[in-house]
Image (cartoon, rainbow, N blue to C red):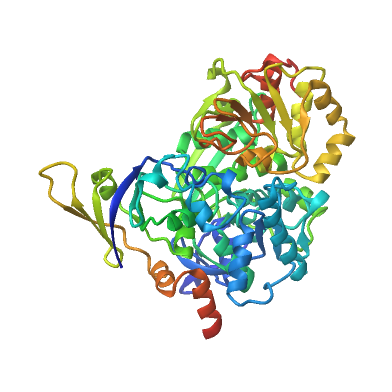
Amino acid sequence: MKFKGKAWKFSADIDTDQIIPARYLNTSDPKELARHCMEDADQQFVNKMKPGDIIVADKNFGCGSSREHAPIAIKAVGVSCVIAKSFARIFYRNSFNMGLPILECPEAVDAIKEGDEVEIDLNSGEIAIMQSQIENRKSQIFKAQAIPPFMQELINTGGLMKWVKKKVKTG
Amino acid sequence: MINTNYRFEVGRKRIYMPMTITEKILAKHAGLKEVKPGQLINAKVDIALGNDITAPIAIKEFKASGAKKVFNKNKVVLVPDHFTPNKDIKSAEQCKVLRNFAHEQKLKHYFDGGDVGVEHALLPEKGIVVPGDLVIGADSHTCTYGALGAFATGVGSTDLAAAMVTGEAWFKVPESMKFIFKGKFNKWVEGKDLILYLIGEIGVDGALYRAMEFCGSAIERLSMDSRLSMCNMAIEAGAKNGIIAPDKTTKTYVDKRAERPYKFYSSDENAIYCDVREYDCADIEPQVAFPHLPENTKNISDVGNVPIDQVVVGSCTNGRMEDLRVAAKIMKGKKIASSTRMIIIPATPLIYKQAMDEGLFDIYLKAGAIISPPTCGPCLGGHMGILAEGERALATTNRNFVGRMGHPKSEVYLANPAVAAATAVKGRIAHPDEVIKKHF
């Protein structure tokens, strides 16, 4: 699976309240959640970004609440992938369970500048900066941390519920 | 204690694989003799919990899977506590989803109306979670139950849905960190201060993916209410779970409550930890976490002049009897500063009644405080005390993220209930000694 999009950079410790503030959690409708995606981190994010774009964040992305509304909002707004130096554990788990591609790669996070065109090969874990804003900089390729086999199995099956169904059927 | 888990035999001598309390509980629930950090396991859950924000998605997923019945009607617990009493039409609709599902599935533990309390105060109080349990909850503060000697961790809605179908959940066995607290407590210091201090030391991802085990002579002296507030905030250091080995205090607490048989686990002496840290409580003052991360802690004596518009005492961190009592003792005969409003939220109906019976409500009302029904309410910026732009709150809650209690340009400071009560009286962040000289 390959994605290509513009990078939007975020700082360290972006919590789930910034990704989707609790004042909007009186619904779980993905479309409505998408309208407020990243609102308390960058109010203009939903207006600036285009479907397919990529969120690039520093360490501990998605810390705080267990709300699955956070990865739902990110996916529903059209973000194709989140790259971070590290992810908070419940966010990490939720993303795989519900099918939002995420990658850990500190080197790529440091190298990518906001607005860079980034290409991601989810199978190989390769992250390439296609077009840099800084002149004379050649495209760089980074290798993200390998997705653990069980997580790959979850992705390939189409998320946790499908995996559970398959498991129940096959015993 | 006899360890029945052994790794291999050398001649006739058994070599035991030492384990931490977290590893033992996970191994037991996975049907394994032993587990190691990093190992992926499928484990049976004793309780699967959801609330009015997270359960609607789980129920939708549950139904979409084609499942007809939850794996065990006694083990799926639903508590609509976040936006209740329903704050608007949409949240009323979400609660309706829970109510209908609970009735349809004949769930034993569904709490509605006047039975609702803040989930992580309610479940221990009712004896629904017991020592030795493995609990998952679609709420990040599920880690609270570690105070009872249970393995408890927050998950998302899809995990809850899968557990409602299968009664199981997948886990990566976490590495364990050991935090030893020794020495005498300083005045006004409680569990909340120990955990805030610790988060200040290691940071909001200082225990990422790991188990935090709290022990030492100071922890043994901590009350159950203080232990619950300490384990409650393990997630604020990024941890998978926080845990305290059960002891006499645990036994006294659970014996009159437990609805199921329970089991005490403890770590082997030679269990392996990825990090061991020791703290002397003599170094720990009441703590205040400044915006916008729980790691931005300061000693109360270093805070300076910070005027406060709103004080909140409540939540799954500090809405229990001990918290309400200490706030009342400081507020007795005092008036809340005219520039400040104070909201007190007893965490459960039982706590509410007991606080009323003990006369605490009289003290609060005479001081000019607002008493709220049990709810998560303002803690997550839901309702019952939202902040306007530029306003500043001091709360006994667990998070001070951007916009957590309302406007994205408002601020939240975290502290214990004694500091909160003193702050309400003074109208700025205050040391309890400024209001009351006598400690109790």
Relative to the observer, which residue lies in front, A130 or A50? A50
Which residue corresponds to the image point at 39% horizontal and 45% vertical from the top-left?
A47
Position in image of residue A63 (x %, y %) = 48, 46
Q: Is residue B29 visible?
A: no
Relative to the observer, which residue lies in front, A151 or B35? A151
Which residue corresponds to the image point at 75% horizontal and 35% vertical from the top-left?
B322
Relative to the observer, which residue lies in front, B353 or B158? B158
Tell me the quarter of the picture where residue A22 sits.
top right
Q: Residue furthest left?
A: A136
Q: Measured along the vertical axis of the image, is residue A132 above or below residue B61?
A: above
Q: Measured along the vertical axis of the image, is residue B275 above or below residue B183?
A: below
- Say which quadrant the N terminus of chain B sits in: bottom right
Q: Residue furthest bottom?
A: A170
Which residue corresponds to the image point at 42% horizontal and 51% vertical from the top-left?
A87
Relative to the observer, which residue lies in front, B102 or B162? B102
Q: Is residue A44 left or right of residue B433?
A: left
Q: Is residue B14 left or right of residue A83?
A: right
Q: Measured along the vertical axis of the image, is residue B72 above or below residue B160?
A: below
Position in image of residue B145 (x %, y %) = 65, 51
Q: How many marks?
A: 0
Position in image of residue B214 (x %, y %) = 58, 44
Q: Measured along the vertical axis of the image, is residue B337 above or below residue B92?
A: above
Q: Is residue B64 visible?
A: yes
Q: Is residue B346 left or right of residue B176?
A: right
Tell me the quarter of the picture where residue B233 sits.
top right
- Say which quadrant the C terminus of chain B sits in: top right
Q: Residue furthest right?
A: B357
Tell me the quarter of the picture where residue B158 sits.
bottom right
Position in image of residue B119 (x %, y %) = 70, 50
